[in-house]
Structure formats: structure tokens, C-alpha cells
Image (spheres, rainbow, N blue to C red):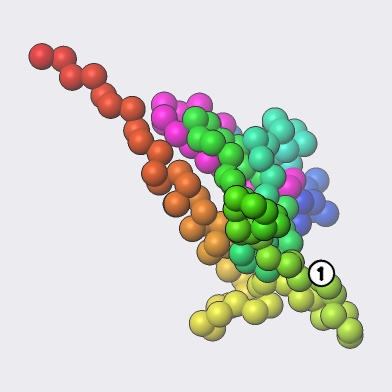
Amino acid sequence: THLSKAGGWCWKYKQQEQLEAFNFVLQLWEAPIQRMAIENPIGWLNTNWQPPTQIIHPYYFGDPYLKETCLWLKNLPRLTYVLKDDMFYKATAIEPIANWVKPGNIRNRRFNKIPEGGNRNSKDRSRTFLKVAEAMATQWGATPLAKKEVKE
């Protein structure tokens, strides 16, 4: 959350936390991990580090929400989605919730409707959307790992 644009208003007050979060991201990115996906909302990383490989919204995969989410991918393909039915593919996307603000200025965001008694705290708000996670598991989980060389 230290790198998300949602906290942008207080970035100047939490520069140390940002630096620590960014160093963590760099350590992950530079680690000897064969395949990697770093997911973070639009924010500090894409403006101060490097452009994301892909930007997605949850509604692309079947969750009815707008939330620009950046993916930095290492040795993984971009997530595929279909916005509209065509001759070959059925749409994976659904119509997003267009009104972010309801009458009376009550925000209509996912974290106001957390199922199963969620607390609406930052952990709840930062969870990956279910349909996005399913797309990641389905599309990337089938990616075979390179076989390790066996020396005899």
C-alpha cells in the first residue's frame, strides 16, 4: 500500500516506507526466480521504476469492478482476456460497475461489500480479485517449468 496511488496524498510523509517497499520489490525482481509476476495498483512503481508489462482491470476476467492493476511479468505471458464475443472466443469480460459514487456520496467500491463479514480494512482492500487470481492460476499454472539438468 505504500506504493499505490491511493496513498499518494501522503507519499511525502512516508518516504522511508516507500523506500523499504521499493527495495523489497527490487530484491524480488532481481532474485533468481525463473517466473515472476509482481502485481500492484497504478502508483509509484509504474512512474518511478519501470512501465508495467500489462495493465488489467478485474472486469476483464469476470469481476464487475474497475481497478487499474499493473503486472510486471518475468518469463510469463500476458494474461489473455476477451472483451466481446467473436467468432472464435466467448467474452471473459463483463460490464463493469460504472458508478463509483452512489447518490448521497456513498462510495460503491468492492471493499464496501466484502463478503463473509470482512472488516473493510487495508488488507481486505488489497486482496487480489478472485477472477483475476483464477485467470493467473489457469493461464500461468499450465506453463511448464524448464527441466533441470541432471549431471551424472
Q: Which residues are magenta?
A: 26-43
In the image, what residue type sits under mark 1? Answer: Ala
Residue 23: give x, y in percent of width and height. 58, 34
Residue at image coords 67%, 50%: 56
Residue denoted by label 1: 98
Closer to us: 145 or 127: 145
Q: Quadrant of residue 32?
A: top left
Residue 123: give x, y in percent of width and height. 57, 65
Please rate how many residues cluster around mark 1, counting C-alpha atoms within 10 Å: few if below 14, some from 14 to 19, many from 20.
Answer: few
Q: Does 114 appear in magenta?
A: no
Residue 41: give x, y in percent of width and height. 68, 50
Q: Is residue 62 left or right of residue 97?
A: left
Residue at image coords 42%, 31%: 33
Residue at image coords 26%, 24%: 148
Residue 67: give x, y in percent of width and height. 72, 58
Q: Does 38 appear in magenta?
A: yes
